[in-house]
Image (cartoon, rainbow, N blue to C red):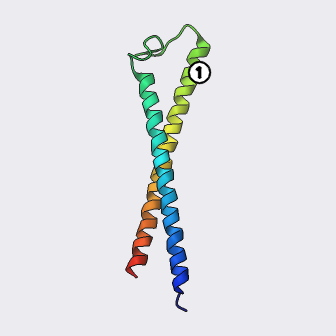
Amino acid sequence: MPRSPESGSAERNLLLTVCTLVAVAGLTAFGSAYICGFVLDGFASSETMVLLITDAGLKSDDANLERKLTAATAALRTCRDLGVALGMGCLGVGVAALYRLGNQNAS
């Protein structure tokens, strides 16, 4: 049974919506990964936090502050890695959706 023109148009619109949402989610994920990376680079810069970060690791008078800074650094690394993973997933879904959209246009 052949498809009606209406169902093809609805499927195309749905695919375009998915592509748009995936693109926005991917850009957001890569943007948050970039911001986390920027903050992590600031933590690692010897000019930014001279008293807190040394070549031997984090050094501070206050053990609680040192523990919080270590936890914040680990959390930022996790957010950065999750952002990159989400962005790569969105890229894969976007490529698959665009491939399918291209195959529909060829038919």
Helix, strand or loop for disc 1: helix
Look at mark 1 in the image and give the residue it sits on.
Answer: 68
Q: Residues within 10 Å of mark 1 (few under 14, many from 20)?
A: few
Residue drawn 41% across and 69% down?
99
Residue drawn 42% across and 23% down?
44
Residue drawn 47% across and 51% down?
26
Residue situated furthest right in the rendering: 64
Residue drawn 43% across and 24% down?
42
Is residue 106 shown left or right of residue 85?
A: left
User: Which quarter of the image is occupied by the N terminus?
Assistant: bottom right
Q: Is residue 81 above or below residue 92?
A: above
x, y (%) of residue 15? 50, 68
Is residue 36 shown left or right of residue 65?
A: left
x, y (%) of residue 29? 49, 46
User: Which quarter of the image is occupied by the C terminus?
Assistant: bottom left
Q: Quadrant of residue 34?
A: top left
Asked whether 73 or 26 is in front, the reply is 26
x, y (%) of residue 25? 51, 51
Amino acid at pointer 1: Lys
Residue situated furthest bottom in the rendering: 1
